[in-house]
Amino acid sequence: MLDTTYTVRDTDMTEEMRFLLGTYPRDTWEAHPGFKDKTRHWLSAHQNFRALAERVRLDTELMLDKGMALDDYTARLSFLGGRLVGNLHGHHGWEDHSYFPELSAADPRFDAGLEVLEKDHADLDVVLDDFTRQANRVIKLAALDETQAFEEAGAVHGQAQVIEAFLKRHLTDEEDLAVPIILHHRLRG
């Protein structure tokens, strides 16, 4: 079992980093004429990540409470966990190499927040790699030693909680920083 402690940033980005959020508050985004499908899809991907992380945690809780068979759990963990990790890595890679440079070029004030977001991506990569190792261990153990697989699923649960907390903080900050810039500069149309 992994014995790793993760630090999830628990502070909001500074007001200076959320410089346009007051002008473009979250509850006005959908109605703004600059809010286009590309932005809607990006936000939808974020909602999907939140839901997948929650589903992995809830499935683990259900299995640990004996409400789901271990075989059913490991099949779901393999599929949903793989989807969560793979899609997050792909999404963050795209943001780091394409999306964020576009926002930075449009508004250099984005760069201060970008440093925080890139650090989050690096920290989350560590959590996701550990989660992948632990989930794979539980999946393999399910065929070899169900008792040990059950015991080690607790670590998967803890990591799923960390991923959820990480995504809650990171994705909200990312959205609060990026979407107002997109609306202000009419990007992604």
Image (cartoon, grey):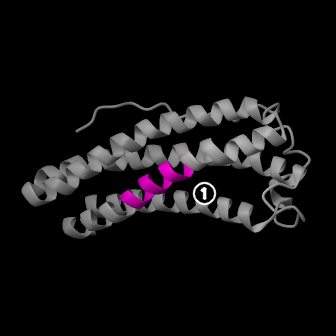
Is 107 magenta? The answer is no
The percent coordinates of residue 164 (x first, y second) are 50, 49
**Magenta extent:** 82-92
Most foreground residue, 182 or 160: 182
Q: Answer whether residue 9 is visible to the viewer in this image.
A: no
Q: What is the tally of numbered marks visible in this picture?
A: 1
Crowding at mark 1 (Cα within 10 Å: few <14, some 14-19, many 20+): many
> In which quadrant is the C terminus drawn?
bottom right
Q: Position of residue 119 (x, y in %)?
A: 57, 31
Rendered location of residue 27, percent (x, y): 82, 59
Indicate the quadrant where residue 115 lies: top right
Q: Is residue 170 left or right of residue 113?
A: left
SS at circle 1 = helix
Identify the residue at the far left of this view.
144
Residue located at (35% from left, 63% from top): 59
Residue 7 vs residue 28: left or right?
Answer: left
Quarter of the figure that contains the N terminus:
top left
- Judging by the rendered image, the residue that carries numbered circle 1 is 46
Q: Of 49 and 186, which appears nearest the observer?
A: 186
Q: Which of the two residues, 57 or 183, is positioned nearer the viewer here?
A: 183
**Residue 16: quarter of image:** top right
